[in-house]
Amino acid sequence: MSDPIVIVQEQITSVSISGQGQQGIQGATGAQGSTGSQGAQGAQGSQGAQGSQGSQGAIGNQGAQGVQGNTGVQGAQGPTGTPNTISIGTVTSNPTASATMTGSSPTQTLNLVLPTSPLYLIYLANTYV
């Protein structure tokens, strides 16, 4: 004879598995999340080293003229110069009067051209007729 079959129905509340199975394959990459809020400002850094000197700039425009200075003291009197001598050179007549000075100081000559007048010509005509 055989043993009777007994069916027990109970509710399973927990299962415990001992041991670990193999790792599964990696899943697909998920969508990118939204940008987070800005973080607090960091502390100010230390001052950097001084840079090298730049090249010389272009020459600027000339400035305005300054105010006139004070008058200087009068200088000493110079030596007495050589006196000038003027001689009368030629004297001629012409309807147009003129004068010329030739030579250079201290010896000069004055040449004159005197105007002829109609009255003088009448005098000459009456004198020598």
Image (tube, rainbow, N blue to C red):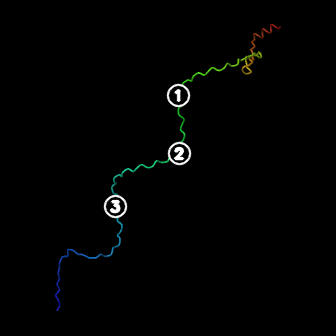
Q: Residues under labels 1 and 2: Cα distance?
A: 34 Å
Task: Give the number of the mark in front: 3 or 1.
Answer: 1
**Dot 3 corresponds to which residue?**
33
Whether pointer 1 and pointer 2 mark residues with C-beta atoms closer than 8 Å, the reply is no
Which of pointers 1 and 2 lies earlier in the amino acid sequence? 2
Q: On screen, 124 above or below 35? A: above
Residue drawn at x 17%, y 78% as measured from the top left:
10
Residue drawn at x 70%, y 19% as measured from the top left:
82
Mark 1: which secondary structure? loop
Left or right placement of residue 124 versus residue 74 in this view: right
Q: On screen, 36 above or below 9? A: above
Mark 2: which secondary structure? loop
Left or right placement of residue 104 versus residue 7 in this view: right
Task: Give the number of the mark in front: 3 or 2.
Answer: 2
Question: How many neighbours does mark 1 have within 10 angstroms: few (below 14), some (14-19), or many (20 or more)?
Answer: few
**Dot 2 corresponds to which residue?**
55
Task: Name the quadrant of the N terminus.
Answer: bottom left
